[in-house]
Each structure stands twice: as structure tokens, then as C-alpha cells.
Amino acid sequence: MTEQHNVTPATDWWRDAVIYQVYPRSFADGNGDGMGDLAGIRSRLPYLRDLGVDAVWLSPFYASPQADGGYDVADYRAIDPMFGTLPDAEAVIADAHHLGLRIIVDIVPNHCSDQHEWFRRALAEGPGSVTRERFHFRKGRGQNGELPPNDWESIFGGPAWTRVPDGEWYLHLFAPEQPDFNWDHPAVQDEFRSILRFWLDLGVDGFRVDVAHGLVKAPGLPDMGHGEQLRLLGNQVLPFFDQDGVHAVYRTWRAVLDEYAGDRIAVAEAWTPSAERTALYLRPDELHQAFNFHYLNTGWDAASLRAVIDASLEAMRPVGAPATWVLSNHDVVRHRTRLGGSLDRARAAALLMLALPGSAYVYQGEELGLPEVTDLPDEVRQDPSFFRANGQDGLRDGCRVPLPWSGTAPPYGFGDAGTWLPQPADWAPLTVASQAGDPDSTLELYRAALGLRRTHPGLGAGDTVEWLDAPDGVLAFRRPGGLICTANTTGAAVKLTERPGRVLLSSLPPSHLSTSRHLLNTTGDYVVAADTTVWWEE
Ligand code: GLC
């Protein structure tokens, strides 16, 4: 054990926590090589404390050839030299705890890197070896085994199988450099419980479980049916996604987490067909939270948002898990761009999310109102799905551009040298330094909102929202403690029949309140401006 927890030992801290995602390559560069690292993260922890988040989730920083931005892990107990050393990781955990921040690390159990020792041995020891049983090796179909063993496709495009020189094929649901583990094998199960303990002993407060829905495959690895996969992905249980057998794994993981004091948690990245199936991962003896991708995938439209909010809360209630809310992460187009490009709308979406009961995830840079970078030249791209096309959109680099911290030109204080992906030339007004202290800025809006979540715990509390009557295109709901949230998702100002209370916070920049988009119009009616969310105190 290294550093003890300095954070409040309150139980259930995670039920309404705001958790900030750091993508280490792109957060802050401590050694001036153009790549973010643990030293950079450590130096910016006070920024995260001042932002007002409760916990930080770090995407992978483990030893990795970086075929998929570190989601191809070669050694789960070692730090990649590009990010630093194990003592650097310990220092991040210790400093975070001193600042009252919790640390969640990514764990990648569905697959490893093709450079992982187990896979290298499996390749070297050949067909029939016990080391091959830890992965999914099969003979091919066709007369000479020249066809893949089944028709599954990689999520990144192309077949989910790669043939090795001795003629066998191995399964990889993602890139060929990411062989899938065989979770029926006890050695795999034991190894991951041991990895969990390794990081829990170092003091981490929890895990984000990568591809949590993928570990268990249907017996016999049955075909999907030609051309069916893309249509069914996310809409139905598949032979490799969301199999019921996966829950037995998480029951054993929960037992490990519960051995440790301090409410250590796990959050599932589980793509399932419905909120009800997501809830199965969150039964009391399984994981604590799951990302709400159904919410992330909902457009900026009051009726659809209300439906997904109700469905999410409803689905979580029987298992007693908090709902979670997320707008952006390292795999999707940043929400400012996805919702149409307007900063007003991105700010309104953030205030809506932060008024909902449960836990919220904030992706680095959304607090700066960063847009997606849509014009990266092909030669700088690194996302493996870009190179394998036809699977995912292949455009995940645009949300991974290094953060702008200060200054008027790249690298905008990210580090001393360049950046591994180029930053746009017009990001000077978006830096932390230029936004800090400016009440109109998106950074100050997030700071104010997160501050209010602390002084008004009702904002994240409970498992219900009390809907209020509202004009078309507007959401209005009451939260415990006499707080009302109104979100106008339309492109026009909307008149409210009565004033909900005193304005606590509006997503409209304060200086705009004195313009035509005033909350109180000239005739004295209460008006919520277009694409604006307001928190009111009754
Ligand atoms: C998850 C990660 C993504 C990665 C994939 C394969 O979806 O979020 O970045 O490419 O898993 O590990």
C-alpha cells in the first residue's frame, strides 16, 4: 500500500459524483515530447480540483504499442515509458487524494495487445498449446482453412479474425493488434482479479471497464448471418456482445472491490440494446455504474430527451444503481459539434445534464467548449478505425486533439514542444488561461455549475425528476431543495407562463442577459432564450 486516502471516507460518494475523463495523450505534456503524460496530469490536478469535479477517470497509460491509443495493453502492471513510470502513477494518485479527488483507472479485459507476453507465447508455442487456450484460436474454414472460422466482423472494420503463419486464426473484435481473451479460461479470470488488486493496492478508487459487454462469447462462436452485424450492433444481444455469461465475471469482481475500504467502484462501458439490459450489469452484486450511451445518442430535442431521461431512471430503479449522464468522450464527436455546432447549445446541454439525478461524466475540453476538429489531414491520423474504414466512423482523432491551456498559438501551453495531433490555429480564445475569470466563458459556467452541485446537493440527488408543465420544446423539472431546471431546446426564445423563481445560473453568458436575448423581455414576461438552460431557485 502506498498513500492512504485523504478524501472524505463518505460512502456512496459515486452516486452523484461528477467524474472527469482524462485522455492522457492529450491532457498535458510534462516532458516536452508533444505527448501528454502522467507528469502533465499531476501538474494540472489543481485545475481539476478548482473545476469542482469529484473524481478523475484516466484512460489507459499502461505499457502498450499504442495500436489503439493504449487500449492495446502489453503489460497491465507497467506504465508505458511515453507516459512515465509507476512512481509517477503513484504520485498522481497521492496528489489527487490530497486534493480531495478520487482516481478511476481504465481496465481493458476483453483483449490485450499482440505484444502481451501471453499472446507472444501463444504464437510461439503453436496449435494445441495450453497458452493458445487463453485466446480464441481456431482452424479456418474452406478446403485449406483459408477462410475465417466465422463471419464476425471487427468493430473497426474487416474480418474479426487474423491468420497466423502456422495456419490458425485468432479472434479480435477490434484491431488485429488486439487479440480477444478467452474468458472461459480460469487463468484469464485469475489474472484479472490479480490486476484489479494490484491497482486497488496502489490506492485507486475504481475502474472504468472497457468493452465490459464483450468478454463472454456464445458457445461455438456461431455465425451472425451475412451482412447482419452492422444492422444488429447495439440493437440486440449478439454472440459476442452482451452475453448473459458476462455477469458471472462481474460478480467475482465486485467481491474483490468489496474487500477494500473506501467504496471502490467500477463503471461499465457496456453497449447494450436497452437501458434494462444495461441495468443487469448494475445489480447490487455486480458493478456500480454504466455509461448512459442512450443519453449520449439522443439529439437536442425536448421530447426525446425527456423520454430517455425517464427510461434511464426507470431502468435503474429496480437495481438501485444511480443513473449516469454523458455527452462526450474519446470515442465520439464532441457534443458541441454533434449537437449542431452552436456553443449556446453545448452549454445548455451541459447544464441540463448537471441537473439530473445521479452521476455525470465530463470529457476533457468540454468545459472549454471545444469543438470537434474536423479537418485533420489524413497523414496525422492515428485512430485504427480510420485505417480499417467501414466499421466505426473512423474519425475518433478529432475529439483527441491536445488541450489548449494558455498562449496564443499552438501548442497553447500543452507542453514545451509540439503536439502529437495538430491543434487548430484559432484556439487562442478557448485556452484555460483566456477563459479563467471571464464570467461569460464556458469554463466559468462549468465551475459555477459544479460549485452549485456542491452547495445544492439536491441537484444530483435521488432517482426521480418531477416534471413540470412546459411549452413545446422546453423541459422543466423540479429537483429536491426547491430547484427548478428549464431547458429550451428550440431555436427561438420561449415565454414561460410563470416565473419559476430566482435565477441561480443560466447557460446564457451573463453579458448577453442585457441584450435582446434577455430572460425578462420588454413586456415583463419570463422568457428562456433559444438553446438555453436555466437553474432557478424557488
Ligand atoms: C472502447 C474504448 C475505445 C477502444 C475500444 C477497444 O470502446 O473506449 O477507445 O478503441 O474500447 O478497446
Image (cartoon, grey):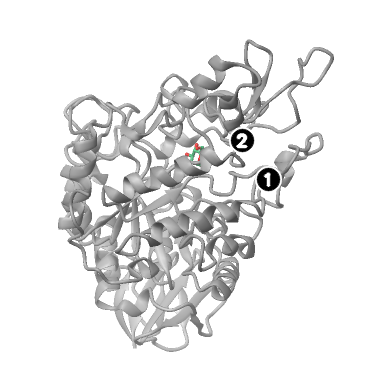
Q: How far is the residue under mark 2 from the one under mark 1?
A: 9 Å
Rendered residue at 27%/34% (across/down): 36
Q: Is residue 332 visible?
A: no
Task: Give coordinates of residue 337: x percent, y percent.
Answer: 46, 47
CB contact under 8 Å: marks 2 and 1: yes
**Residue farthest to the right, as pictured:** 143
- In this image, 191 relative to 184: left or right? left
Q: Is residue 57 left or right of residue 415?
A: right
With 196 as the anchor, is 8 left or right in this view? left
Position of 218 relative to 163 (above/below): below
Left or right: where 294 falls relative to 321: right
Label 1 CA crowd tier, 10 Å (few <14, some 14–19, many 20+): some
Query: Which label was assigned to residue 233?
Result: 1
The C terminus lies in which quarter of the figure?
A: bottom left
The disc label shown at residue 137, or none: none
Judging depth in this view, the residue of 467 and 103 nearest the camera is 103
Pinpoint residue 361: horizontal percent, then vertical percent: 39, 57
For the point 32% across and 56% down, which residue is it? 205
Question: Mark 2 belongs to which amino acid?
Answer: Ile
Q: Which residue is mark 2?
A: 155
Q: Nearer the viewer, residue 53 or 298?
A: 53
Q: SS of the residue at dot 2?
A: loop
Give x and y (percent) for residue 246.
60, 51
Q: Earlier in the sequence, mark 2 or mark 1?
A: 2
Indicate yes or no: mark 1 CB to ligand 1 under 8 Å. no
Ligand 1 lies under 8 Å from the Cβ of mark 2? yes
396 above or below 92? Answer: above
Q: Is residue 268 above or below residue 303?
A: above
